[in-house]
Image (cartoon, rainbow, N blue to C red):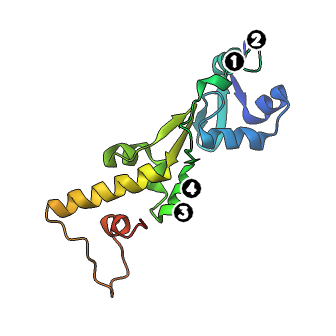
Amino acid sequence: MQKMMMNENELATRWNISPKTLQRWRSEGRGPRFMKMSKRVVYPIDEVFDFESKALRASTWERASDVVLPSGSTLMDPREISYVTGLPLYLFTQKQMREALGIPHRRVQKLIRFDRDEVIAWAKRWVQDAQDQGIDVKVDPSSQSRSLLHALASLPA
């Protein structure tokens, strides 16, 4: 009988990498597709072979030209843009939230990146649209909670 799945340790041994590397890749959306059954992670053999065949290159420069960044642009990962803006991290990490709010982002290969200036401009438009619709941005100072709209309004210029 042919084996149809590989566990994390078997794949790490096959590729001579640490299981921690595979764990990090999964959190970043890299590596072969996997299945999670309860706490156990397994990789279908076909997915491993497919990933390996896509990784084959004839030269080192083949993939480098795929990503072209605008000049003078510094792209940030979700954690960095969350820290800079003071907005919750989930706004940037969850695809549904990004799409629902229209947060500007770029896909750099399999990673999502944000331009600080674009995000600040988006936030200003978002607050202005809310104010145009009659939604008040002011919040009670004695209140411990802060709405998303208030957080957007308090972004630095």
Q: Residues within 10 Å of mark 2 (few under 14, many from 20)?
A: few
Image quadrant where one finds the C terminus: bottom left
Label disc, if present, on residue 62 of the rendered structure: 1
Q: Earlier in the sequence, mark 2 or mark 4?
A: 2
Q: Nearer the viewer, residue 51 or 82?
A: 82
Circle 4 residue: 79
Q: Residues within 10 Å of mark 4 (few under 14, many from 20)?
A: some
Circle 3 residue: 83
Answer yes or no: do the residues labelled 1 and 2 have beta carbons within 8 Å? Answer: yes
Circle 2 residue: 58
Secondary structure under badge 4? helix
Of the two numbered discs 3 and 1 in the rendering, the one whose residue sits closer to the viewer = 1
Identify which amino acid the numbered label 4 is placed on: Arg
Relative horizontal placement of residue 145, taking residue 36 as reference (left or right): left
- Residue 38 place in picture, x, y as percent: 59, 43
Q: CA distance from mark 3 to mark 4?
A: 6 Å
- Write the residue at 73% across / 20% down: 61
Identify which amino acid the numbered label 1 is placed on: Glu
